Amino acid sequence: MVGIILASHGEFAAGIKQSGQMIFGEQEDVEVVTFMPNEGPDDLHQHLEDAIAKLSDQEQVLFLIDLWSGSPFNQANLILADHEDKWAMVTGLNLPMLIEAYGSRLSMDSAQDIAAHIVEAGRDGVKVKPESLEPQAAEAPAAAAAPAQAAGALPEGTVLGDGKIKIGLARIDSRLLHGQVATAWTKSVQPTRIIVVSDNVAHDNLRKTLITEAAPPGVKANVIPIQKMIDIFKDPRFGTTKALLLFENPEDVVRVVDGGVELPEVNVGSMAHSEGKVMINNVLSVNQEDVDAFKHLESKGVKFNVQKVPTDSKANLDDLLKKSGLKGV
């Protein structure tokens, strides 16, 4: 039997499993993974691995995930990368989809066959009353307009717009592109492009692929090294681009700013805890190198706001850094 992993932010996965049991009865080989506010990506990854280990047979595994590009998606995608010949994942989990998956296991023994089959059930389960509110399918235009030529394909020296890239948001987030960025921040900033700026990630083909796959609909994601970001900032061919920049740490921001990229304000979202770091709130951990980087950026006129999502109130970074007990604060 195909094993099913239900994974979500918070207790949604546990709740929908209970709802599915009320309708379809008790199910074997269905495990729940919940990602809670006080946990990090490593915790979530381990929860997924533990859930897979509980399945009676790991030959065929189907992940049903709440949100494309969220943390459960990203961590499941890392695991799926080693099993793409047999395993599968579907996002946008809803109750019609789950019930169809349960029913499909009675006649299908392939996770990928079930995944392909249940997508339509998930879509069909989304309806509206009164029916007049149902969106009408738009007719395809007779001839689609040719997409704008990519800035990188234009001859050097070409000036688009005012010749200067617009940075809608620069954010430090060790998780990089995940649910909060792909949904809340993207909707708030409305960028035309999400750019992950990191030498480490730019040279890691697997992480690059996972990040570009996690881009929300209608927005392209790129992973570039730090020097490339400095070059792009000075390139007039990117004058019509509005970017959301993501950095893993403040040290990379220092290199970009020292290279000439103008960042008047930087959003500090999440910095994962690791050995030698001090927790200054529930999502931020710093060491002396981080503190020095923040202070260097402040000396360059960069301002900071600490916010997980746009609706949160802004916290003062200096006040938080004082809790670290490190030098320079």
Image (cartoon, grey):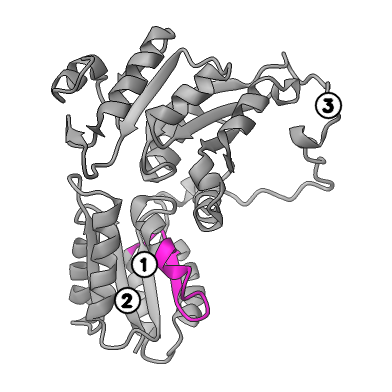
Q: Is residue 126 visible?
A: yes
Q: Disc 1, disc 2: CB below 8 Å? A: yes
Determine the CA span between mark 2 and mark 3: 51 Å
Residue 317 horizontal side relative to residue 233, left or right? left
Instruction: Where is residue 42? Give x, y as percent.
Output: 28, 55
Disc assigned to residue 64: 1
Name the secondary structure under disc 2. strand
Instruction: Where is residue 314? Give x, y as percent.
Output: 27, 19
Residue 187 horizontal side relative to residue 161, left or right? left
Residue topped by disc 3 = 156
Residues packed near mark 2 inside 10 Å, few (<14), some (14 to 19) or many (20 plus): many
Task: Choose the circle earlier in sequence order: 1 or 3.
Answer: 1
Q: Which amino acid lies under the numbered mark 1 shown in the image of this protein?
A: Leu
Disc assigned to residue 4: 2
- Quadrant in which the N terminus is drawn: bottom left
Residues packed near mark 1 inside 10 Å, few (<14), some (14 to 19) or many (20 plus): many
Q: Is residue 171 above or below residue 59?
A: above
Instruction: Name the quadrant containing residue 126.
Output: bottom left
Q: Which residues are magenta?
A: 77-94
Determine the CA span between mark 1 and mark 3: 46 Å
- The label nearer to you, 1 versus 3, is 3
Q: Nearer the viewer, residue 35 or 79?
A: 79
Task: Choose the circle earlier in sequence order: 1 or 2.
Answer: 2
Q: Which amino acid lies under the numbered mark 3 shown in the image of this protein?
A: Glu
Q: Disc 2, disc 3: CB below 8 Å? A: no
Instruction: Where is residue 92? Give x, y as percent.
Output: 40, 58
Residue 167 horizontal side relative to residue 290, left or right? right
Instruction: Where is residue 219? Give x, y as percent.
Output: 58, 40
Residue 288 horizontal side relative to residue 165, left or right? left
